[in-house]
Amino acid sequence: RRILFAVLLAAASLDGHAQSSLPPCPTDTTVPWTNCFGTLTLPNGDKYAGEFRDNKMQGEGILYRPLPI
C-alpha cells in the first residue's frame, strides 16, 4: 500500500507540473522564487511541489508528508 501511495503522489506531482503554465523555479534556492513552479523541501521533511509567488507557496500545489515507518 505504501509503495502504491508513493507512486500515486509522484504521478500527481509530475502531472501538476505538466499542467502549470509557469516556468520552472531557479535551481538556486538563495534567490527569491516568484511566478514559477518548483519543489521545496521544508525543514520538517515535508515537500511542497507547486506554484511560488513572492518567494511563498501560493496557488495550486501538493504538500507531501513523509509516512512513518
Image (cartoon, rainbow, N blue to C red):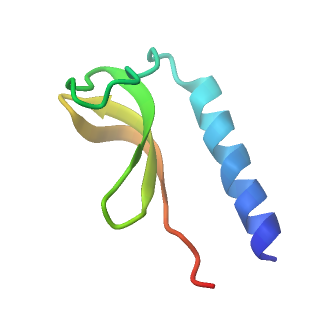
User: Going 66% across and 46% down the picture, which residue do you hit?
Assistant: 12
- Of 2 and 51, which appears nearest the observer? 2
Q: Quadrant of the N terminus?
A: bottom right
| Position above or below: 23 against 20 | above
Q: Quadrant of the C terminus?
A: bottom right
Question: Looking at the rendering, which quadrant does residue 67 occupy?
Answer: bottom right
Outermost residue toward the bottom in this view: 69
Q: Position of residue 29 (x, y in %)?
A: 30, 31
User: Going 43% across and 27% down the picture, which residue do you hit?
Assistant: 37
User: Going 49% across and 67% down the picture, which residue do you hit?
Assistant: 65
In screen coordinates, is 1 left or right of 23? right
User: Going 77% across and 56% down the picture, which residue do you hit?
Assistant: 7
Question: Looking at the rendering, which quadrant does residue 15 occupy?
Answer: top right
In screen coordinates, is 14 left or right of 57? right
Q: Position of residue 22 (x, y in %)?
A: 44, 17
Question: Looking at the rendering, which quadrant does residue 40 occupy?
Answer: top left
Q: Position of residue 17 (x, y in %)?
A: 58, 30
* Number of numbered labels in the structure image: 0
In screen coordinates, is 51 left or right of 11? left
